[in-house]
Amino acid sequence: MWQEYLDEEDEMGEFYTEEGIEEVSNALDRFIQGLIDLDDYNNNETIEELIKNVVLDINKISQKYDGMIETYEREELVDFNIQH
């Protein structure tokens, strides 16, 4: 979705950069790969650690690219995580 804003030169696109989108994508890929690699889906501690790490990664990206990840984007990320 964020790439579409950038590609279409939507007014929302001013908050996004290729680099920022790529960093978010990489953080989400690490999160998904961590879930895929789980041996035991009942291991709440490991799952909580994966969630904590992706949240910390997103927070770092948010600080680096000020204005890119605000409430709306965080809600989109929550929806993404729930779907996966």
Image (cartoon, grey):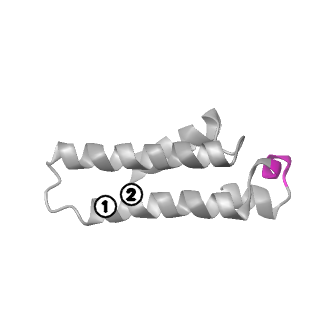
Q: Amino acid at mark 1?
A: Gly
* Contact (Cβ within 8 Å) of mark 2 with mark 1: yes
Q: Residue at x 61, y 44 (%)?
A: 62
Q: Residue at x 31, y 61 (%)?
A: 34
| 64 over 7 or under it: above or below | above
Q: Residues within 10 Å of mark 2 (few under 14, many from 20)?
A: many
Main SS of the magenta part reads: helix
The residue range painted magenta reads 10-14
Residue 33, image x and y in percent?
A: 35, 65
Question: Mark 2 — residue?
Answer: 31
Left or right: residue 39 versus residue 77 is left
Q: Amino acid at mark 2?
A: Phe
Q: Residue at x 45, y 43 (%)?
A: 55
Left or right: residue 19 versus residue 83 is right
Q: Residue at x 59, y 49 (%)?
A: 61
Q: Quadrant of residue 3?
A: bottom right
Q: Residues within 10 Å of mark 1 (few under 14, many from 20)?
A: some
| 25 over 59 or under it: above or below | below
Q: CA distance from mark 2 to mark 1?
A: 5 Å
Residue 10's tag is: none
Asked if residue 11 is among those painted magenta in the image, a careful observer would answer yes
Left or right: residue 38 versus residue 30 is left
Q: Which one is nearer the viewer's eye here, 8 or 18?
A: 18
Check the picture and name the quadrant holding the C terminus.
bottom left
Residue 44, image x and y in percent?
A: 19, 43
